[in-house]
Amino acid sequence: MKSNILEKIEKLNELEKYQEIITLIENLQVEQLNTEIIIELARAYVNIQKYEKAIEILKSIENEGKNSVDWNYRMGYSYYYFKDYKNSEKYFLKALELDETEDNIKKALLNVYIELSRQTINESIENQDKAIEYALKSEKYIITNDDKIRVSSCLAWVYKEIGDFDTAEKLLKNVINSGRDDIPVNSELGYCLEQLTRFEEALEYYKKAMKLGRKDQWIYSRIGYICCCLKKYEESLEANLKAYELGENNILINSELGYSLGELQRFEEAITYYLKAKELGREDRWIYFQMGWSYRHLEKYDKALELYLKAKELGDNIAWTNAEIGICYKGLGKYEEALKYYLIANSSDGLNEDKNKKIYLLSDIAYTYEIIEKPAEALKYFEQAKKAGRNDGGIYLSMAKCFEKLNKKEETLEYCLITEKFDEYKNNIQLLSRIAALYKEKGEYKKSLEYLEKVERLGRDDCWLNTEYGFCLMLLQKYKEAIEKYKHALELKEEVSDEIYLNSQIGWCYRNLEECDKALKYYLKVRELGRNDSWLDVEYGLCYKELNNYEKALEYYLKGYEKDNRFKEDTYLLSDIGWLYDRFGKYEDGEKFLSKAYELGERNRWIHMELGECLTRLGRYEEAIKKLLKLRELYIEEGKLPYSEDLELAYCYAALKDKEKAEEHMKLSLDALGAYAESEEYLKKRFTEIREMINSISDSPQFFSKFKKFFS
């Protein structure tokens, strides 16, 4: 039976009145003390955390207790809480040797080996093998499922600490499957997965730890980091700011806050945190690059450039840094310097693995060449950007602009049409207007009208659109519709030059409708607005000619001819001036203009006829005959029967006293004219004149008797 003293001590233990136990025992007489009571005294000192005192008391009875389970257990227990785990191991092992059935001793040894494992790895990572050995030793003392969980947790922690995150992950998942699903396990598992760059899974376990109640700066900073890696910058910012509020204020968190803010385009705020990281001692190339990046996006190119160059000075040899420097120089308008750094970046293999950056760089090189008016070079890099994978409307539009600068109209149109196929450009008024203009320049007026109609449907209704519309209709000879568009354009005009042009075009349309009175009204308006060029003079001449006012027509033709050298080689104008001079009987002047038109390549029937008649009037019969014979040949080639040509040829041959040819062509003319020769007074008069000329050569009664009815 227990003594009264031990019973009293037991009751005080149950009430956790350890100091009373100490007082009770220390007040006992020596003869009342025994090994068991002294062990209880040591136990009481352990419970008030006076471990050295407990060890001292136990050692005082070592001779009596060293072979007892209880004494060795209490020694192990005291050393355990004194964190002297090696000595704790020694006494617990002795206790177990004395009683192999005692589960408390096994549990104590399990705890000792777990602590030895942790202590060993904390002292030096190089002791990892010893740490694992201790953790594995603890497995021998597993009794309950909780013990198994504790051992697996310890092993997982050790493997995590030595960087074997795969093994740690497996162990931690086993722990969860075994029933432990608390804050530490989820936190540790999240960390392992983070180190394995399995960020989505890591985030899941970190959030679970938070749900279980963890709300400290560590968990918020880990979530902030993970979300930043996952490009969830809003979440990252929120978590890191919470960690910051809880006291996390180091280089890493300020760097992450700056980075997230930068990615969220909040560059001013980003710079604030980067500067804090710098104040805390961060002086590496990363911080200078990130600050440069923020300043560059704020278009503070001078400051950004300074920071990028500092990053390079600190060893930044990343290809993209050269690209960023190029962007800064471009922003400062220093395009040659920009190209220098762009081309350095492009020559590096570092960008080949980043498709998006490669495309951006090649495109910006092209844009820079475009700015400095080197479209051929720009096209080279646009092509490279395409090969790298860029395939959007913007690149084809830029290429179209380059081709346009190179005056390559076909390619310009081709690339504009490709651009149109992209959804964002299908209804782009500016692009469709340009396509319409290109078709117009190409002379494909119907295609141009198709695009102009589409632009009009999309809502464009300005002077340009209606002017272009009118021009295409005009050249398709739809003059009335063209006039309507031109008149509407006049209502929308912005400049006097527009008014001059539009009135000129309306006048031109009316003239082609043979409404020359109306045409002249618009031409008069044009002249009042200040236009006084050769084109207008010629148009006046054309109108007056159609109105049979030949004097005015000739007057304005000659004005236009004298004003502009291009009209000095205009065969139509030269021919018309010659024709008008002939009408006034000024054959020498007429021949001069007609011959010039002929020399410049005018070779139609009309010019041969006019020249033939004019030369005849001037008595230059041999020259006249050449032109008239050519004219006759052209008539026959067209399947027509000449008549006036033969009449004029008969006259010329008669004048040259070539009776035979004169009679031949006289006959041909009469045969061709038939009854018409009797009814036309001019012809009867002309035939009579030629007859008299032939008669003056010699009598030809037989010839003329056949045509007596024409000459009676």
Image: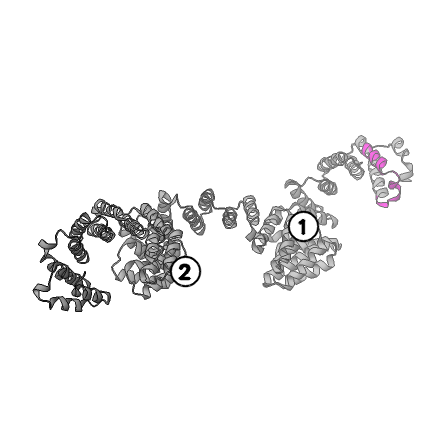
In terms of image quadrants, where is residue 381?
A: top left
Q: Please, what secondary structure does the residue beneath circle 2 have?
A: helix
Taking the image as drawn, is residue 312 in sight?
Answer: yes
Q: Residue furthest left?
A: 30
Q: Quadrant of residue 684?
A: top right
Can you say which quadrant of the picture contains the N terminus? bottom left
**Where residue 122 sits: x, y (%)?**
21, 52
Tell me which colouring the rendered structure shows.
Answer: one colour
Q: Is residue 457 part of the magenta span, yes or no? A: no
Residue at image mark 1: 475
Q: Amino acid at mark 1?
A: Leu
Q: Main secondary structure of the magenta part?
A: helix
Q: Nearer the viewer, residue 674 or 164?
A: 164
Q: Is 350 or 258 nearer to us in this picture?
A: 258
Residue 234: image tag:
2
In this picture, residue 94 sits left or right of residue 389: left
Most foreground residue, 533 or 427: 427
Query: Where in the figure is residue 14, as x and y percent of width and height?
Result: 24, 65
Q: Secondary structure at mark 1?
A: helix
Distance between the Cα atoms at labels 2 and 1? Answer: 61 Å
Q: Position of residue 322 (x, y in %)?
A: 34, 50
Q: Is residue 658 left or right of residue 702?
A: left
Q: How many numbered circles are shown?
A: 2
Q: Residues within 10 Å of mark 1 (few under 14, many from 20)?
A: some
- Residue type indicated by callout 2: Glu
In the picture, the quarter occupied by the C terminus is top right
Residue 678 drawn in magenta? yes
Q: Is residue 334 visible?
A: no
Question: In the displayed structure, would residue 187 be above or below residue 382?
Answer: below
